[in-house]
Amino acid sequence: MSEAALRGTSRESLAGAREALSTLIGTSGAVCAAELRAASDSLFQVSALLDREAGLRRALTDSARGDGDRAGLARAVLGDQVNDAALDLVVWCVRARWSGSRDLADALELLAVEAEVASAERAHRLDAVEDELFRTGRIVAAAPALRAALSDRSAPVERRAELIEGLLDGRTAEETRRLVRQAVVNPRGRSFDRILTEYARVAADRRSRLVAKVTATVPLTEHQRGRLGAALARIYGHDVHLNVEIDPEVVGGIRVEIGDEVIDGTVLHRLDDTRRRLVG
């Protein structure tokens, strides 16, 4: 579930929860990388628990109960199952207001991803994680048999997890492997590619950067990537991370997608534009 999918009260509550996480992360020496990874594991665990236990989910988001009552319930149920940092964040979240009970589980998943990418940032691996999430999604999307195996709900979860970990073994950052494994183990009704896209967006947000999908006929040189990134940064007022995809069918130029916006500079697009003007 992406942050953009949350609306109204839930979106405001998630913003506050992310600020609480940022405060925790930013406290000098308070939380080490290993603790961030443990917090991520715990938050993923609670999100999955709330997906399974509708009664608990409703109780923790019931506005008719006082926020102290909801916080006490969270501590009673989860206190011996999650680490202290994750429990503090869960308690913060259950004290907040949510438009729907499922939004709490969605928010905890997003916080889990953010804790993981914060760990990568501390290890100076955040750029690598962004790139690897994107590339892994494209590799699986281009391999129908692999995609089907990872999506096969009749196969044991651990077998599917072993399959993707075997693919990534020694080839990616630890944080990438952990996030990709989570996408396989608990997809929450989404496609593998969609999950990795959402996770990569959280990683980009960690640096307050935009993510641009760039489609080109041939790989871009470092100089070309630098010029394109600088030009997009001037346009959007933010640093822009480039995910470059090669498509031999693109006829000259490049195509850039940022969110819902598309900048199409391909020869084919220009020919189509010229044709429309001539006909008009």
Image (tube, grey):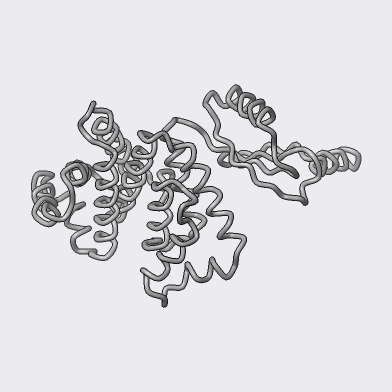
Name which quarter of the figure residue 162 lies in: bottom left
Counting from the top left corner in percent of width and height, residue 140 is at 55, 60
Residue lying furthest front: 170
Task: Give the residue at the far bottom of this rendering.
Answer: 154
- Residue depicted at 56% across the width and 50% down the height: 135
Name the residue: 43% across, 35% down.
205
Residue 40, compared with residue 193, is above or below; it is above
Residue at the image point whose x is 31% and y is 41% from the top: 14
Q: Position of residue 107 (x, y in %)?
A: 32, 47
Horizontally, residue 254 falls left or right of residue 230, namely right
Report the side of 146 relative to 185 (left or right): right
In this rendered view, identify the residue nearer to me: 170 or 48. Answer: 170
**Residue 273 versus residue 121: which sits nearer the camera?**
121
**Image quarter hosting the C terminus:** top right
Query: How many numbered tags mark residues here?
Result: 0
Q: Position of residue 82 (x, y in %)?
A: 18, 51
Residue at 37 percent across and 69 percent down: it is 157
Query: Looking at this view, is 98 or 53 the one in front?
Result: 53
| Residue 203 horizontal/vertical position (percent) | 43, 40
Horizontal relation, residue 246 to residue 212: left or right: right
User: Residue 81: which quarter of the image?
Assistant: bottom left
